[in-house]
Amino acid sequence: MSFNKRASLEISIQAIVIVVLAMTILGLGLGFVRGLFKNISSTTEDVTEQVRQKILDDLITSDKKLSFPKTEVILDKGGSTVMSIGVRNKKDSEMSYKLKFVPISNPDGFSFNIDSPKQWFQLQSYSTQNFKIAPADSRIHNIRLSIPSDIPKSGSYLLNFEVWDDADSSKPYDSKDFYVVVRG
């Protein structure tokens, strides 16, 4: 009888040791994963700041009115991404302006209409809001491009990003073409 009690006591001690080791390893693993995610979010913030700085540098050094670093954006149906766009006022007075996205062609090569630009592009009040910028100053806008999940066709959509100066509505202040490639 004493032999069985001793064997069961040893098994109980081994089970407790295994449980303690498993909990310790689990805790260390969770701590490692948490630290890894903190590093990822810190890296993402650093990259975002570097992109903003690159856009500002591009506006100043190349003497451009508009800096739009992407010529192609690849997204899945229902996907989204944030784009940074820089605008520089090269006038001698304060400028009031609007931002617009103008569809040019769809995957079939035909012109198309975006039913509502707000479906694709999310910016503070989109093109209804006037932004102001001081003379010789630059401003960065972050714009979320969201592709509707019910878009009828995958392929390349050609769009034109335009900045319109409220003082001169005859032509855009500056513009840039870019492709949105929809996969799905």
Image (spheres, rainbow, N blue to C red):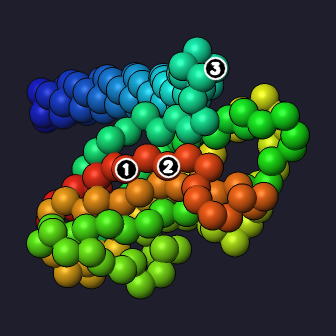
Say which amino acid is labelled 2. Ser
Residue appearing at x 72%, y 33% in the figure: 90
The numbered dot on residue 175 is 2
Left or right placement of residue 52 versus residue 128 in this view: left
Distance from Cα at disc 2 to Cα at disc 3: 17 Å
Residue for point 58% across, 59% down: 171
The mark that comes first in sequence, 2 or 3, is 3
Label 3 residue SS: helix
Mark number, residue 60: 3
Residue 98 shows up from this direction? no
* Image location (x, y in percent) of residue 154: 15, 68
Q: Nearer the viewer, residue 49 or 126?
A: 126
Q: Is residue 33 at least partly visible in the picture?
A: yes
Could you say where residue 7 lies in the image, as x and y percent from the top left?
A: 14, 28
Identity of the residue furthest to the top in this view: 61
Q: Earlier in the sequence, mark 3 or mark 1?
A: 3
The residue under label 1 is 177
**Residue closer to the observer: 3 or 169:** 169
